[in-house]
Image (cartoon, rainbow, N blue to C red):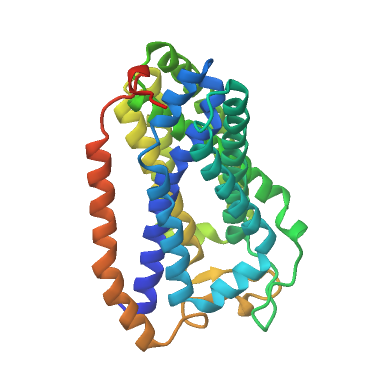
Amino acid sequence: MDLNVLWFILITVLFVGFFFLEGFDYGVGALMPIVGKDDDERRVALNTIGPFWDGNEVWLITAGGAMFAAFPHVYATMFSGFYLALFLILICLILRATGIEFRSQKPSLAWRKKWDMVIAVSSLLSAVLWGVAVSNLVIGVPIDENMQYAGTFFTLLRPFCLLGGVMLTLIFLYHGACYMMLKVGEETVLNRVQKIADKIGPLMILVTVAWVVWAFFASNMFDSMIALVAVALAAVSMILSVLFTKKRASGKAFIFIGLSIAFCVVGVFAGMFPNIMISTIDPAYSLDIYNAASSPKTLSFMTKVALTLVPIVLAYQIWSFYVFRKRVTKSDVKY
């Protein structure tokens, strides 16, 4: 396996980790004002991600750094063409982090409610924007012969991409609900979460099927057998998760929606391979793992760094989830 392919796989793995871990963060943040009817209940919901949310964002930073190091032309084109969209995501991440840290700094209920809404809106908007961004990568964007993005911000808001925003938002909301079913120890909050998951699940499946069918006709994603198998496994996992939610098997429901997200990410990247950004102007202008890559020497050095650091990050995340594995109740809420 050459280093270009290896780094494509590594970036895929990093985005799998990001969407899996940050997905339930977004879901919990967006659902918090709905599942929590008073301040303590909202804090219980927020405390389920309290030890993890900032660590989960490291996967995005690592994925962005890996893309910059391995495929700098992709990094340059994406961050210039998607500048406004990525800037909005950054603002949402900042607002969400600020809300989580600031909400408990004053005893005022009005103060806390305002920050709770900031957390919810920023989480929801982040999910929408990521769905739009991923959908644009699937069907391609206008890239010229100089590797420059030739569209505008509104070029990114095509109907298929907006549907992708809705789809990923529903997936993250459901993912967050499944996570809270595992972590919440308050019966009243848990009952609300289960009812919300029951309502979101079927709608999530319906919208996802619509997006996949549209992608089949609007892109070359399913020319790849790996992408086809991955999406099929994602669909089966998603359906199983919804069925387990109905049976209140929260652990299995969470595992299978997590697998569904992972298979979806693998399917998207496999469907683009060897391209990373597809040009709608001319396929020859697409950025792939060879024309957009760093030098072999750079890739070789970065491979050694990645093989050393990624296992450490992964081990730390597993350890942190083990340490904070217990359910959260009102007795754990402290200010």
* In-image side of 130 versus 318 (left or right): right
Residue ID at (24%, 59%): 312
In the rendered view, would you say 27 is above or below 245? below
Residue ID at (47%, 70%): 67
Where is residue 89 shown, x and y percent of the image?
A: 60, 52
Residue 53 found in image quarter: top left
Where is residue 50 shown, x and y percent of the image?
A: 39, 36
Residue ID at (38%, 25%): 334
Where is residue 2 shown, x and y percent of the image?
A: 33, 80
Residue ID at (24%, 69%): 308
* In-image side of 320 versus 157 (left or right): left
Residue 1 visible here = yes
In the rendered view, would you say 287 is above or below 243? below
Locate the N terminus and report the quarter of the image it occupies: bottom left
Q: How many marks?
A: 0
Where is residue 266 shown, x and y percent of the image?
A: 42, 55
Front in this rendered view, residue 44 or 88: 44
Front in this rendered view, residue 133 or 107: 107
Q: Give the farthest residue toward the top.
A: 188
Residue 228 visible here = no
Front in this rendered view, residue 25 or 231: 25
